[in-house]
């Protein structure tokens, strides 16, 4: 299973204030939708609360209180998401659904899952933001930039683990 973390990150590493994201670019949101469509998405409960359900993608919500998270049903009567009480359990559920799985935040989940992630898909914004939630440092000893697409005020950047580290 390939695990990809996807995030919009300010020049100072900020991704949010605990409730919302500092940047919302229509072009980035459209790309997020296109890239993640059809794949499961692992997220923290706070990010789920902020974003709600996104069509066409199963939400796997990590929380210490799974029974408190409710999901609407799809046309076949199945819940449109699943709440799990650990990251291990999220990975177990995701691996049964697809070979490609996205980690979509927020801060707590990125920090805990970065050591497990295979790729980073980062919208790097050329401006700082205010907020207490940050993306973990992208250590150049671990991550190699493999693609960069400039789009004015931000770049779409992809990183892979440095294979020389094994
Ligand atoms: N810029 C971006 O790309 C981006 C993307 C996503 C989110 N964000 C921003 O990030 C912020 C939210 O991030 P956050 O760090 O505050 O919260 P978060 O990571 O979304 O969710 C935290 C919650 O996840 C659960 N959790 C975390 N680790 C767990 C574990 N090991 N086992 C079980 N449950 C666990 C807990 O839920 P319970 O409290 O229910 O137990 C915890 O309160 C918001 O500002 C949001 O807008 C930004």
Image: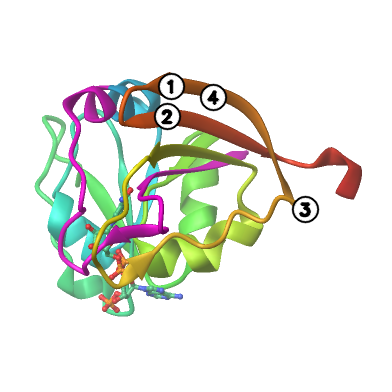
Position of 55 with respect to 143 (left or right) is left
- Circle 1 — which element? strand
* Label 4, residues with CA under 10 Å away: few <14, some 14-19, many ≥20: some
Query: Looking at the rendered structure, which numbered label has been put on residue 68?
Result: none
Residue at 36 percent across and 55 percent down: it is 105
Whether residue 17 appears in magenta in the rendering, the answer is: yes
For disc 1, the marked residue is 150
Magenta segment, which residues? 1-30
Q: How is the image coloured?
A: rainbow
Query: Looking at the rendered structure, which numbered label has been put on residue 148?
Result: 4
Q: Is residue 147 above or below residue 39?
A: above
Q: CA distance from mark 4 to mark 1?
A: 6 Å
Query: Looking at the rendered structure, which numbered label has been put on residue 155?
Result: 2
Q: CA distance from mark 4 to mark 3?
A: 18 Å
Look at the numbered discs 4 and 1 and tell me whether their residues touch, using CB distance below 8 Å.
Answer: yes
* Nearest the eye: 54 or 164: 164
Q: Is residue 63 above or below residue 23?
A: below
- Circle 3 — which element? loop
Q: Is residue 66 above or below residue 44?
A: below
Query: Looking at the rendered structure, which numbered label has been put on residue 141?
Result: 3
Whether residue 61 appears in magenta in the rendering, the answer is: no
Query: In terms of sequence position, does the residue under pointer 1 or pointer 3 come before the other?
Result: 3
Q: Is residue 66 above or below residue 96?
A: below
Query: In terms of sequence position, does the residue under pointer 2 or pointer 3 come before the other?
Result: 3
Q: CA distance from mark 2 to mark 1?
A: 4 Å
The answer to whether residue 37 of the structure is visible from this angle is yes
Whole-percent x, y for residue 132 in the image: 29, 73
């Amino acid at each position: 299973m390939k695990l990809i973390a996807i995030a919009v990150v300010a020049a100072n590493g900020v991704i949010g204030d605990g409730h919302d994201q500092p940047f919302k670019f229509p072009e980035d949101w459209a790309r997020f939708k296109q890239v993640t469509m059809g794949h499961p998405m692992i997220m923290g409960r706070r990010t789920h609360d902020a974003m709600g359900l996104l069509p066409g993608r199963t939400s796997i919500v990590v929380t210490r209180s799974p029974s408190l998270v409710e999901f609407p049903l799809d046309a076949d009567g199945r819940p449109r998401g699943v709440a799990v009480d650990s990251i291990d359990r999220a990975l177990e559920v995701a691996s049964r659904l697809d070979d490609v799985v996205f980690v979509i935040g927020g801060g707590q989940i990125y920090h805990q899952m970065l050591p497990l992630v295979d790729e980073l898909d980062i919208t790097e914004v050329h401006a700082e933001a205010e907020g207490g939630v940050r993306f973990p440092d992208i250590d150049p000893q671990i991550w190699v930039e493999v693609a960069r697409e400039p789009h004015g005020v931000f770049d779409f950047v992809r990183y892979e683990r440095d294979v020389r580290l094994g």
